[in-house]
Amino acid sequence: MCLIAFAVGMRPGLPLLLAANRDEFFDRPTAPWQRWALPGGAEVLGGRDLRDGGTWLGVSPNARVAMLTNVRSPQAASGGQRSRGELVTRWLAGERLERLRADTVPQGYGGFNLVVGDLNTGAWHWLSNCDPCRSSEGVVPQLASRSLSPGVYGLSNAAIDTPWPKTQRLKAAVAEAMHSGNIASPMPGWENGLAQALADETEAPADQLPTTGVGLARELALSSAFVRLPEHGYGTRSSLVLRITKTDQPASWQLDAHEWTHLAPAPGKPHCWDDTRRHCESLLLRI
């Protein structure tokens, strides 16, 4: 997952609103948003990396949430033999935050941002092995961690809330949605505005681009919310809009999600948003 904006704890009865695009190589095998079981038997709801077995974003039936992006920069942690997706599944399987911090060896993974939340406690945290205050050539990665207070946050391929243009635009769309009248409505259509923001192909001006070591042409292509790099076999593979609302039933939350799957372009065809491949999921989460 390479672009996420999410609002936590801002509105009574709506503890989480999220919009996300996952960018990846088209030849990496992936399963779409669905219910599946971890090796220990714990059930999760999310996409699945069929190569390494983890996920980039998921929710557990007992109301835990985790999301992950890679970090792209000349100083980002590299190498690492472990799959970053296992960090998400460890949290969803019930690992305590203290254990997650203690048992995560930063240099064992490529650069990552990890956000974990528990709807039952209202606690949210960001963890990363690419602390922008410490990252430099030759420095052993350290695990950065901080709690997140109620607000709107953005993640792309840099530290949380790094003001890349596409991150700022998606954060603004989530903030606007949070104040709309229909965002918690049971009527269809609540997801449309955020879907439009995820489909945005606007590239950032050259003077606002980050320098992450991939060259100007790729920085431009990667600066839009919806990424198209067919010449590299890469682009936005899926898009997700998700909300969690309080129900009238005791000790329960309602999850509603829409995921769009975008296939690799056929010869002579552009890679573009595919509204025909939409999957909708609703799930009652329990405390």
Image: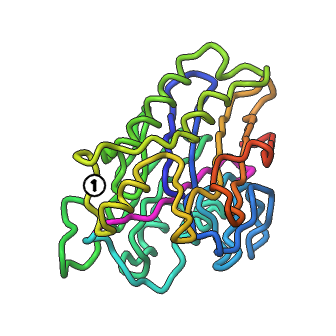
Q: Give the magenta part as a residue range.
A: 60-73
Judge by depth and name the residue closer to the eye, 203 or 172: 203
Does the magenta run of residues contain 84? no
Q: Amino acid at mark 1?
A: Pro
Q: Name the spot of residue 159 as percent of width and height, x first.
A: 33, 55
Q: Which residue is mark 1?
A: 210
Q: Residues within 10 Å of mark 1 (few under 14, many from 20)?
A: some
Q: Quadrant of residue 219?
A: bottom left
Q: Is residue 205 above or below residue 232?
A: above
At 78% from the left edge and 22% from the top edge, which residue is drawn? 186
Side of 125 where 118 appears, left or right: right
Q: Quadrant of residue 89?
A: bottom right
Q: Name the spot of residue 190 as percent of width and height, x first.
A: 69, 25
Side of 170 where 272 appears, left or right: right
At 51% from the left edge and 62% from the top edge, which residue is drawn? 229
At 54% from the left edge and 77% from the top edge, which residue is drawn? 83
